[in-house]
Amino acid sequence: MSPSVQCVIGTSDIIEIPSTHDQLLGGDDGQIFLGAIFPADKEYASTLADIGNNVARFLAKKGVRGRFAIDFISVRQDDGQWKHFAIEINLRKGGTTHPFMMIQFLTAGEYDSEKGIFLTASGNQRYYFASDNVQNEKYIGTTPNDLIDIAMFHELMYDGAAQEGSGLSSDRSAF
């Protein structure tokens, strides 16, 4: 697996772990970011948050402030436990930042890094799949208005009352 954890170090050294994700990689060499599922698998999401918190505390002592993410390669061991290898620290907003901010905006919810779950303001659990790499030759010439019309026709638009829709679900296995 290739999970990630987002961290924020505030101006008062207050550390926040806003999200964990399972990144989906592909391409010829398996290194192209195709998208991410939020939150990361419950088997290790809280462990990623703990690691992120430790790294953030270290970086805070060095004067780092703001948002960053840590990418991992995670391998299930013979005993069923996961071993996480940090491979990269991105001292910036990344591919998982904007989708996470959107779920917060749409649901007024919060991520509980200790439990590895996202709860809407009304207390409902939500998951999403997001990608900035959707491509197909069939899409050439499709305008943003076309895309909205297609989504409406297939009833994929976001439903504010249900707080579900295109890419946002109450069921992680939907992705």
Image (spheres, rainbow, N blue to C red):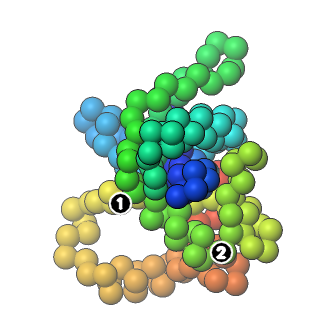
The quarter holding residue 137 reads: bottom left
Please give the name of the residue rendered at 51% of the width and 43% of the height, measured from the top-left corner.
60
Place of residue 55 in the rendered image (x, y in percent of width and height, measured from the top left): 53, 36
- The amino acid marked with disc number 2 is Thr
Answer whether residue 130 is visible to the viewer in this image. Answer: no
In the image: residue 107, left or right of residue 97: right
Numbered mark located on residue 175 in the image: none
Q: Residues within 10 Å of mark 1 (few under 14, many from 20)?
A: few
Q: Please report whichever mark, 1 or 2, sits nearer to the chain's N-terminal start.
A: 2
Residue 41 lies, with reference to residue 102, above or below; the image says above
Residue 96 lies, with reference to residue 90, above or below; the image says below
What is the secondary structure assignment of the residue under circle 2?
helix
Residue 152 lies, with reference to residue 49, above or below; the image says below
The quarter holding residue 127 reads: bottom right
Residue denoted by label 2? 107
User: Mark 1 to mark 2: distance in Å?
Assistant: 21 Å
Residue denoted by label 1? 132
Place of residue 73 in the rendered image (x, y in percent of width and height, measured from the top left): 47, 29
Q: Residues within 10 Å of mark 2 (few under 14, many from 20)?
A: many
In the image: residue 150, left or right of residue 29: right
Nearer the observer, 158 or 3: 3
Please give the name of the residue rendered at 70% of the width and 78% of the height, measured from the top-left corner.
162
Spot the residue most to the top.
Answer: 78
Answer whether residue 32 is visible to the viewer in this image. Answer: yes
Foreground mark, 1 or 2, reads: 2
Nearer the observer, 69 or 62: 62
Nearer the observer, 148 or 8: 8
Nearer the observer, 153 or 1: 1
